[in-house]
Amino acid sequence: MMVSGQAQYVLGHRLDTRQDRAGEEQASFRESISPRYRDGLGGIDLEQVKRDQRRARREVLRTMIRRLK
């Protein structure tokens, strides 16, 4: 068992323990979500994501059709 704050090294790479990285992972997850897709509870607004995906697909199809003409 590892004590928090220690790291293992395997083949020259450092492996952080889950406890060491838990705070970093949560912070990076929050920062990686665009404010456009955040809901009021700190999660992801999946409906907005789906709407944007549908809109993007429509635009791709329109562009492809225009190029074919």
Image (cartoon, rainbow, N blue to C red):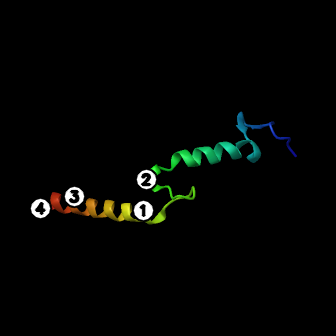
User: Which mark's residue is nearer the viewer, 1 or 4?
Assistant: 1
Between discs 3 and 4, the one toward the N terminus: 3
Q: Is residue 64 left or right of residue 35?
A: left
- Pointer 1: residues within 10 angstroms few (<14), some, or many (20+)? some
User: Badges 1 and 3: C-beta atoms under 8 Å apart?
Assistant: no
Indicate which disc residue 69 carries. Answer: 4
Along the viewing direction, whichever of 7 and 43 lies nearer the viewer: 43
Return the residue at label 1.
Answer: 48
User: Which mark's residue is nearer the viewer, 1 or 3?
Assistant: 1
User: Badges 2 and 1: C-beta atoms under 8 Å apart?
Assistant: yes
Return the residue at label 2.
Answer: 36
Indicate which disc residue 63 carries. Answer: 3
Residue in the picture at 43% in, 53% down? 36
User: Which mark's residue is nearer the viewer, 2 or 4?
Assistant: 2
Along the viewing direction, whichever of 51 and 7 lies nearer the viewer: 51
Q: Would you identify the image quadrant in which residue 53 lies? A: bottom left
Give the spatial CA distance, label 2 vs label 3: 25 Å
The amino acid marked with disc number 3 is Thr
Indicate which disc residue 25 carries. Answer: none
- Pointer 3: residues within 10 angstroms few (<14), some, or many (20+)? few
Give the spatial CA distance, label 1 vs label 3: 23 Å
The amino acid marked with disc number 2 is Arg
User: Residue 50, percent across and down?
Assistant: 41, 65
Between discs 2 and 3, the one toward the N terminus: 2
